[in-house]
Image (cartoon, rainbow, N blue to C red):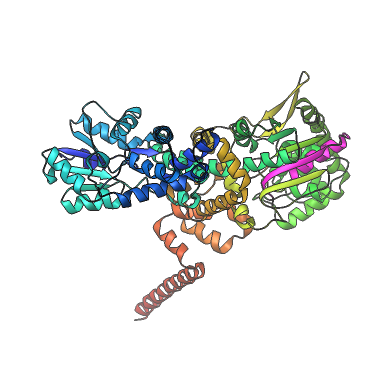
Amino acid sequence: MFFQELLNSDYKLYSFDIFDTVIMRKCGTPKGIFYEMQIELLKSSSGINKCLLNNFCDRRVKAEQIARINSSKEEISLYEIYEILQRDYDLNLEEVKYLINLEIDKEMNNAIANTEITLLINELRKKGKKVIFTSDMYLPKNVIIDILKKNEIFKDGDVIYLSSELNKTKEKGSLFYEILKLENCKKEEIVHIGDNIHSDFNVPKSIGIKSYLYDKTKFSRYEKIVYEDNYCFNKIVGAFKVLRINSINVANSDTYNVGVIAGFILLGYVLWILYEANRLKLKNLFFLSRDGQILFEIANKVNKFTKYDINFKYIYASRQAWHLPSIYEKITEREIDWILEKDPIVNFNIIAARLSLDPYLLMEKVNKEQYVTDDIYENLSNEKILKLRNVLLHSKIVQEMIFDAANSKRINAISYFNQEGLLDSKDIGIVDLGWKGRLQDSLKRILEIYKKNKKIYGFYFGLTSLGEISNTNEKYSYLFDPNNIKYKKIGEKAANIMEIFTTANHGSTIEYVDNGGFYFPKLRNDFTEEKINFKLNVFRSGIFDFLDLVLDNHIISEIMKNNDNYKTKTVKLLKIFIDVPNFYEAKVIGSYKFSSDQAEKNYRMFAQPLSLKDFIKYNYYYRDIRKVEITYWYEGSIIQSKLYIKYFNKIHIDKLIRLLGLINKIIHFAIKRGRMLVNYKKFL
């Protein structure tokens, strides 16, 4: 950026464009102002012509175009625009005045200072530099001064050169000549900063005035995906833009900006959950830890607008706390699936943790039935897993150990459920992120053991499998499931990143503990931001700042009515984020210390930069689940890796392997020739 160059310069005048440079709007484009006006006008009881009100936004835009065509001057005023509307819709003077004041009010409320430009202006003033404001704008001068004052930018003695007041524009170049004349300034003595490549850069440059293009207010790649010409997405894009640019004054701004993106994704998901829960007439909705924590908080924010008669509650749950208590009297393939699951490795230490057993005792009992290993940390091969599976399915001794552990955990689990109100109603709604639906199945089994006849509705971001579904155990997915595969590919690819997006501020639930009749969750107490290497509070600030800027009744209504459209934009945004991340996004998510295992025995960086060795292993040697031993997010790792790794990634991996093979042959040939030469010299 050119800021330091400006601070080191010595111009007589420093000219700043106003809108989209010094001042931003909270909407994506100026048309967002007119959309806001239309919504308010339609809610009002004014007697203004309905034909105008029903299409106010488009009519306001058209009126400005007509006013410019009809005008013989370089610039028009706000009053001239409304004269067109007055003529075409037979408005009286009071109605015109009301509309003008409403537009001014919306401009005032939408205006927000650009933090980094404001800081630059303040630094220039500290150095004794003269700052002026220059704008092609139809708003009255006093309104623009009020906007600048409200945002603490305009100081006593400051000067504004406004096209609507002087009838000269930057676009034509005449406003710059007028400034030179009024300021008694040579063109070499002024510098201009603005966002418009024509009016703020090319025109002053052609005159001989030094100019700098400030292009941060142009849409980012995500904003281009989300933008749509309506109130809802205009406002959402405005929030994206304002938060992105003003994150300069936020510590760990990259984390904050990823939080804003997460806010957009999670909002659509939560609105879908609430809509479905209300449609199913659920009265209680339980958000399961830990993924459900942020979803619970978003739901509470959203329901201030939707006002659904649903009670939200956050309860502590986990695979560790629910799977084991669901085992009763027999072990089936369902239990085998989660007990022996490779994620990405499995050993006796991990298996014992899942079953709340001592790993050495478990290994001893298993080996007596059928020898598997003497090392609790050995990553079990498929052959050894088959042996262990056979023991679990048929050994009464090993099964009794597991049943005893399950029984002791189940008593406290059902007591906790009862305490938290999970058993109070006939129908239970639970919210989780995904991905196999087994947690819901475990809950259903625990309730059935105690003959609690409940119907469970599960709401998920996505499901890779449906598990045990029935008319009393229903599962609904937002993005994908085996019966809804349109977004399956990107959904499965996004799963682990979504886990990071929904990180809670506490450790996972191990079990439930009885404390004199009150049951509380025993949590892993080693959770800290430092352990996961993630600024969670900053990340969540991005989510909540986004929500605070966009949430209103109209936006929520529009998203709910057109959820498929919002979902499509979510998928496009996820694809860009996952498949072509920028370095900073990859660094934020890639540095996260992640564990996908139920017992959380192994933490590793989510997406570390790849060495050549890692690159070859990932692409050539490792298959499927073992790939996560290197990285959970290949694209995130690549963008952080050294240049030669990025180059190798662009060419086909087979070409790299052939190249390495050729290099190997050349080296061996050179060594062989060297030895032959030595032997020949000895012979001579």
| Residue 219 can be seen in this image | no
In this orientation, which residue lies closer to the viewer: 505 or 383? 505
Residue furthest to the top: 516
Read off the magenta span: 437-463
Q: Is residue 289 left or right of residue 419?
A: left
Q: Quadrant of the C terminus?
A: bottom left
Left or right placement of residue 545 versus residue 356 in this view: left
Identified at 20% across, 39% down, the residue is 14
Residue farthest along the bottom direction in this orientation: 684
In the foreground, 42 or 396: 42
Is there any visible trace of residue 540 in the rendered image?
yes
Residue 1 screen position, x and y as percent: 29, 45
Residue 457 is one of the magenta-drawn residues = yes
Q: Position of residue 376 (x, y in %)?
A: 69, 44
Whether residue 316 is situated above or below residue 476 in the rendered picture: above
Question: Is 582 left or right of 467, judged from the image as shown?
Answer: left
Please tell me whether residue 633 belongs to the stretch shown in magenta: no
Callout count: 0
The quadrant in which residue 509 appears is top right
In the figure, is residue 123 to the left or right of 430? left
- The x, y position of residue 47, in whole percent, is 51, 35
Quick check: 582 above or below 656? Answer: above
Q: Which residue occupies the foreground of this view, 316 or 489?
A: 489
105 and 499: which is toward the camera: 105
Q: Residue 623 location in percent, x, y?
A: 61, 60
